[in-house]
Image (cartoon, rainbow, N blue to C red):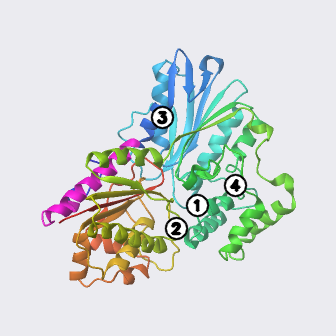
């Protein structure tokens, strides 16, 4: 089992209905994680046969390339590299090498990597020098290639922080400051990445530009999405795709969150100069540097949601998907989800024949940091939901699970948390006030106390978050 504190979450003091729903909820999380394993996603998307590589509807004759180089980064990078190595070894294609940036602390002991693709442990969510040196080595590999070589770029969530290469005139420490300000501001991932791309010499299509200006090698980018909408230019800030944003967009984001006068002067100078000098803009759609670039989206949370839906239907739930993806401030979304949950619970007071309802949602919320507590977006959303429901009498069984499938969220060690009738009643008995914890962004301390946090550690997966609501009629 992937969930490490499963026995605590399924404690003996739970009532029968809460225990049943928790088992189903946790099994759903396990199914979701197995579905979006990077190894499985690559196995489904790629095939090597008779020295030819097949990806979706495209075919690449591998014997046409002198060397294969593997670069990239993200939370799923290690397992993606392992899967690519397996494919290449299956046809005795051994002339490859590479380097991948992965998060510090990620356990790769179960991966039988050859050592030809080096793993560089960098920091997330704030970039560090180790990550920057790794990117410089990747760029060197790419620029030393020739037009007869093939470069794989493996991209997954977390790559924006794990693949730092500041523009000339910007120190890494200054880039770290910008990242910290953005992450605490409540800006969406799309907004954050609009800024990141314009302060980077790697992201926003700049990797492709470097390859075109040097080796003109063929580039295949394999991408696992962790962003709402699966926009390729936002995933890891799009090092291999045309940039849909501009320097002007970056400035607008910083002004929107009152950060433009807080970022280092060097960052302000780069953005202002970019606005005035069109040739400094990141490469756009139609740029000839993308002529030998092939980008493939090979995985997202959608496949996980579909598999969870199949499982829940087998458990006799009437399954619905939330009408819109999870976006916006976690606290606000929690109140909205509370209203939706209570609305669905009220259906059991009518002559509605349905006795088991499940709702599935995906996306990524944001948190505006105002306190110094420990938490994450899913836990904060659930705590806000609890706060809205704390005085409501609920007569039927419910369970709500909200998790970050990469295994870690915010500055906590949890992937998310669960709430149900048992936890709600326990909270009331202990006279705990969710608002107290919300004011300090301290949701994890609450769920740790209530034994409702879900612990997996880093999973090696990285897609959007998953929210699951299970409701069952009890009489």
- Who's the residue at 34% across and 75% down the image? 386
335 lies left or right of 97: left
Give the mark, 4 or 3, whose residue is nearer the N terminus: 3
229 lies left or right of 12: right
SS under mark 4: loop
SS under mark 3: helix
Query: Quick one: 12 or 208, which is closer to the camera?
Result: 12
Give the mark, 3 or 2, whose residue is nearer the N terminus: 3
Query: Quick one: 145 or 259, which is closer to the camera?
Result: 259
Which residue is disc 1 drawn over? 189
- How many numbered marks are there? 4
In x, y percent, where is residue 160? 59, 54
In x, y percent, where is residue 253? 69, 68
Q: How far apart are the alpha carbons under marks 4 and 3? A: 28 Å
> Is the C-beta separation of discs 1 and 2 under 8 Å?
yes
Residue 464 seen by the camera: yes
- Who's the residue at 80% across and 37% down the image? 288
86 lies left or right of 317: right
Which residue is disc 2 drawn over? 366
SS under mark 1: helix
Which residue is disc 3 drawn over? 42
Which residue is disc 4 drawn over? 200
Please provide the residue range marked out in magenta.
8-35
Query: Quick one: 461 or 400, which is closer to the camera?
Result: 400
Give the mark, 4 or 1, whose residue is nearer the N terminus: 1
Q: How far apart are the alpha carbons under marks 4 and 1? A: 16 Å
463 lies left or right of 239: left
Q: How far apart are the alpha carbons under marks 1 and 2? A: 8 Å
Give the mark, 1 or 2, whose residue is nearer the N terminus: 1
The quadrant of the picture occupied by the C terminus is bottom left
- Who's the residue at 29% across and 53% down the image? 317
Q: How far apart are the alpha carbons under marks 2 and 4? A: 23 Å
């Amino acid at each position: 089992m992937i969930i490490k504190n499963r026995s605590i979450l399924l404690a003996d003091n739970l009532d029968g209905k809460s225990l049943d729903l928790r088992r189903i909820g946790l099994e759903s999380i396990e199914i979701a994680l197995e579905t979006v394993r990077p190894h499985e996603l690559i196995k489904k998307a790629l095939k090597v046969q008779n020295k030819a590589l097949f990806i979706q509807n495209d075919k690449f004759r591998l014997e046409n390339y002198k060397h294969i180089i593997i670069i990239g980064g993200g939370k799923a990078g290690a397992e993606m590299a392992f899967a690519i190595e397996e494919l290449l070894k299956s046809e005795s294609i051994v002339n490859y090498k590479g380097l991948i940036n992965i998060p510090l602390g990620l356990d790769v002991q179960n991966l039988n990597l050859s050592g030809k693709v080096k793993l560089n442990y960098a920091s997330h969510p704030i970039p560090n020098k180790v990550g920057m040196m790794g990117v410089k080595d990747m760029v060197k590999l790419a620029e030393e290639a020739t037009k007869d070589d093939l470069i794989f770029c493996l991209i997954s969530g977390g790559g924006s922080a794990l693949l730092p290469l500041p523009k000339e005139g910007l120190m890494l420490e200054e880039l770290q400051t910008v990242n910290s300000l953005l992450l605490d501001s409540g800006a969406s991932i799309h907004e954050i990445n609009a800024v990141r791309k314009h302060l980077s010499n790697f992201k926003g299509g700049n990797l492709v530009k470097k390859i075109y200006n040097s080796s003109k090698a063929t580039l295949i980018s394999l991408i696992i999405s962790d962003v709402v909408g699966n926009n390729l230019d936002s995933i890891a800030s799009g090092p291999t795709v045309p940039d849909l944003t501009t320097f002007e967009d970056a400035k607008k984001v910083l002004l929107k969150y009152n950060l433009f006068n807080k970022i280092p002067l060097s960052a302000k100078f780069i953005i202002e100069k970019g606005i005035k000098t069109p040739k400094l803009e990141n490469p756009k759609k139609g740029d000839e540097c993308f002529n030998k670039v092939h980008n493939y989206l090979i995985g997202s949370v959608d496949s996980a949601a579909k598999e969870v839906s199949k499982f829940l239907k087998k458990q006799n739930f009437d399954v619905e998907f939330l009408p819109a993806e999870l976006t916006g401030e976690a606290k606000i979304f929690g109140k909205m989800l509370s209203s939706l949950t209570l609305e669905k619970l009220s259906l059991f007071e009518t002559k509605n024949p349905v006795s088991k309802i499940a709702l599935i949602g995906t996306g990524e919320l944001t948190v505006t940091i105002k306190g110094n507590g420990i938490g994450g977006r899913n836990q904060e959303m659930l705590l806000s939901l609890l706060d809205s429901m704390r005085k409501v009498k609920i007569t039927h069984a419910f369970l709500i699970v909200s998790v970050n499938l990469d295994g870690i969220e915010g500055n906590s060690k949890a992937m998310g948390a669960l709430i149900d009738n048992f936890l709600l009643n326990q909270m009331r008995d202990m006279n705990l006030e969710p608002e107290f914890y919300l004011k300090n962004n301290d949701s994890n301390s609450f769920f740790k106390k209530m034994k409702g946090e879900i612990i997996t550690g880093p999973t090696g997966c990285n897609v959007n978050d998953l929210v699951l609501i299970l409701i069952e009629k009890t009489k």
